Image: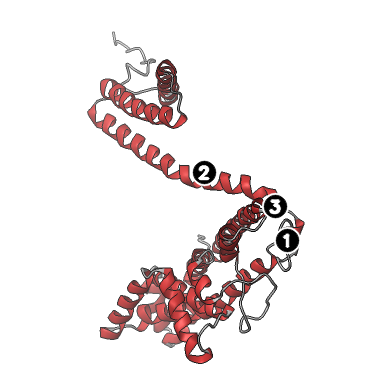
Amino acid sequence: MAITQAPITSALKAGKLHRFTPLYIILGTLAVATAVFAILGAVNVAGILIVTAVLFVVTYWLLSLFVEGSRKAKDRLMTSLVVIAFLIALVPLISVAITTLTNGAARFDVDFFTMSMRNIVGEGGGALHAITGTLLITLATSIISVPIGILTAIYLVEYGRGKLARWITFLVDVMTGIPSIVAGLFAYALLVIFFGEGVRLGIGGAIALSVLMIPVIVRSTEEMLKLVPNELREASYALGVPKYLTILKVVLPTSLAGIVTGVMLSVARVIGETAPLLIIAGYTQSMNYNLFDGRMMALPTFVYNSYAQQGSDAQAYIDRAWTGALSLILIVMALNLIARLIANIFSPKLGR
């Protein structure tokens, strides 16, 4: 007569923790940490969370070691540490977002987006001149940087051989790490040659930001081009298509989504730079639509100027600074969303 073994219904007997075990441990360790701080009479949210995290990692690891063995316990220990590291990384991001949103909401109104600061010394006014300047300088920066960056990457991947390619790669690496203020000094020194000392132009800000933007575009585009399979190029060459047409009709369309994403992210990276614009673009309280004539305000310099040079009504200047920072964050977020949307639209569709 065959003996049928009864099914194991207990998770502990099966050598596996219940799926809600982490939740139970978190609640238990949180209660213990809160009770300890309450007894000590020094309730501190940050301290409670730190003690809870330490107790959770230790308790979770010991319980897994007892029930599931050392191998699974190590896996759960590393998973816990990775999750905690991720949560810690989110803390400053969430803190900055909440702080900026809370303080920037005070002046997030119609006047802020439809008025400049011309003849405004107290309450009121807005950042229309700064928003316009940011968009114009960023547009000019993109016009300068995108063709240079993409063509440089095409040369390095498709044509570059020997010392010249190595030197270009080396210079791109060096440019990636230069301080932003050096880019501003470079643009100022360049324009001084043509316009003399004390020059302040919006186009100078675009030149300075291009120095920071070009290496990012080169690196991102280069990596995208390298991902295109060589079989596609070889198939095109086998049909007698010239190399330049292969690049235009095969390589670039295949990597277009990644290239556009890299360009958008590079724009988001330079749009918040302050030091180069302070040096070469300057700041003004009036509207200026001409990149080649006079000073031009941008949102980063608007925020800095509003906070650093407060007038008689200091709170009004601080409110405008926070709202300017919030507007800049929203612009960067919009650019990232546009980049993701474009990447999804132009990414190659895989089908059978």
Gap between marks 1 and 3 measured at Cα: 10 Å
Who is closer to the viewer here, 294 or 326?
294
Q: Amino acid at mark 2?
A: Ser
Badge 2: residue crowd in 10 Å (few <14, some 14–19, many ≥20): few
Q: Quadrant of residue 1?
A: top left
Callout 1: SS: loop
Q: Quadrant of residue 292?
A: bottom right
Q: Is residue 166 above or below residue 256?
A: below
Residue 11 vs 252, above or below: the answer is: above
Residue on which disc 1 sits: 125
Q: Amino acid at mark 1?
A: Gly
User: Where is residue 349 drawn, in percent x and y?
Assistant: 53, 62
User: Which residue in the protein does label 3 denote?
Assistant: 107
User: Label 3 sits on what residue type?
Assistant: Arg
Q: Which of these two is toward me, 22 or 139?
A: 139
List the residue tagged with mark 2.
Answer: 95
Residue in the foreground of this view, choosing between 253 and 146: 146
Mark in the foreground, 2 or 3: 3
Residue 39 % position (x, y): 41, 15
